[in-house]
Image (spheres, helix red, strand yellow):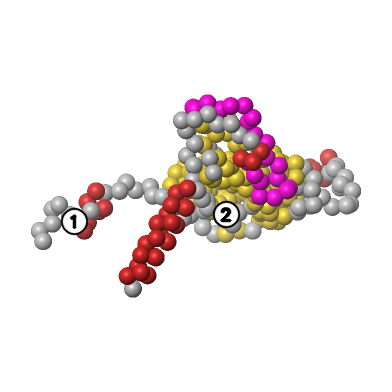
Amino acid sequence: MFNKIWVLIALTASTLSFSNAQVSNDFNFPVDKFDFGIVTEGEVATHTFEFINAGKDTILLKAENVRASCGCTTPSFSTEAILPGQKGSITAAFNSQGRPGIFQKTITVYYKDQVAKMLNIKGIVEPKGPEAAPAPPTEAELKKAPKFVLEKTTVNFGKVERGHNSLYSVKLSNPGKDTLFIQKAQAACSCTSYKLVKEKSAEEVKFVLPGKSVTLQITYTPGTDGFNRDILTFYSNDIAHPRTSVVLESEVVESLQQKSIIQEGANNAPFSNK
């Protein structure tokens, strides 16, 4: 029994040591995630992540320090020496050719035999069919068509408690001449949902009549701590603008409530009469 306890202690210590060795604090990335939204197949989607050298030593990145999770993503990076306090950058380029559907890729930064950071990119590749592009709508068709007009297309929820559902309501208008329908909505995460309700009412509707407005309610549950940016794209029968994207931003924190000293030390409360 005694030997088993020592083996368990040794394994626990080894696990903690391994875990601690996996994280480096030399790289400070203000943003480590990016959502491209809709990407047309064949397009190379690129995004640059900036970081600050938060360590005490000069950073000099080489090819072995920056690795992508697959061959479809090509990383590039600052090659000059980055002094403490200075900025550097890492760019992710995703080749969408032959990769329709949702994608989620990572770029891992290794430094001093440690994992310094994992950068995440995601989006939805819309297939490019073999058929020719449809003819643009005529002026007469545009005059008779519905219109999808959102009061706001970027929503910042501010600080959000981890695991909390945030609700935002925005006005959706149809100044067109025909009834507006949302055919589908897509996001590269499972963190969003929506519904249409009548203005100043909780009654749900499925369309917007010409010249009328409804309230678009978006529920957002960001998945990871830190800064999050997710894109929800609506497809409608607005032939002039069949796609409309809404950018959702938030900063996820563990809790929005300040911790109480009395609550934290409840087992040894200084004012206990016991």
| Marked residue nearer the N-terminal end (2 or 1) | 2
Image coordinates for residue 116, horizontal then vertical, percent: 53, 42
Q: Residue drawn 26% across and 49% down? A: 260
Q: Quadrant of the C terminus?
A: bottom left
Number of other residues with Cα within 10 Å of mark 1, as a class: few under 14, some 14 to 19, many 20 or more: few
Callout 1: helix, strand or loop? Answer: helix
Residue 245, quarter of the rendered image = top right
The amino acid sitting under disc 1 is Asn
Predominant SS of the magenta segment: loop
Number of other residues with Cα within 10 Å of mark 2, as a class: few under 14, some 14 to 19, many 20 or more: many
**Image disc number at residue 192:** 2
Q: Is residue 131 visible?
A: yes
Residue closest to the eye, 241 or 129? 129
Number of the front mark, 2 or 1? 1
Residue closest to the eye, 58 or 207? 58
**Residue extending furthest toward the left:** 273
Q: Is 268 included in the stretch rendered in magenta?
A: no
Q: Quadrant of the N terminus?
A: bottom left
Q: Label 1: which residue?
A: 268
The amino acid sitting under disc 2 is Thr
Q: Is 82 included in the stretch rendered in magenta?
A: yes
Q: Residue drawn 49% across and 45% down? A: 23
Range drawn in magenta: 66-85
Compared across the picture, whether 173 is left or right of 228 comes to right
Compared across the picture, whether 148 is left or right of 217 comes to right
Callout 2: helix, strand or loop? Answer: strand
**Image disc number at residue 74:** none
Q: Are marks 2 and 1 in contact (CB under 8 Å)?
A: no
**Residue extending furthest toward the bottom:** 1
Q: How many marks are shown on the rendered structure?
A: 2
Q: Residue drawn 52% across and 37% down? A: 27
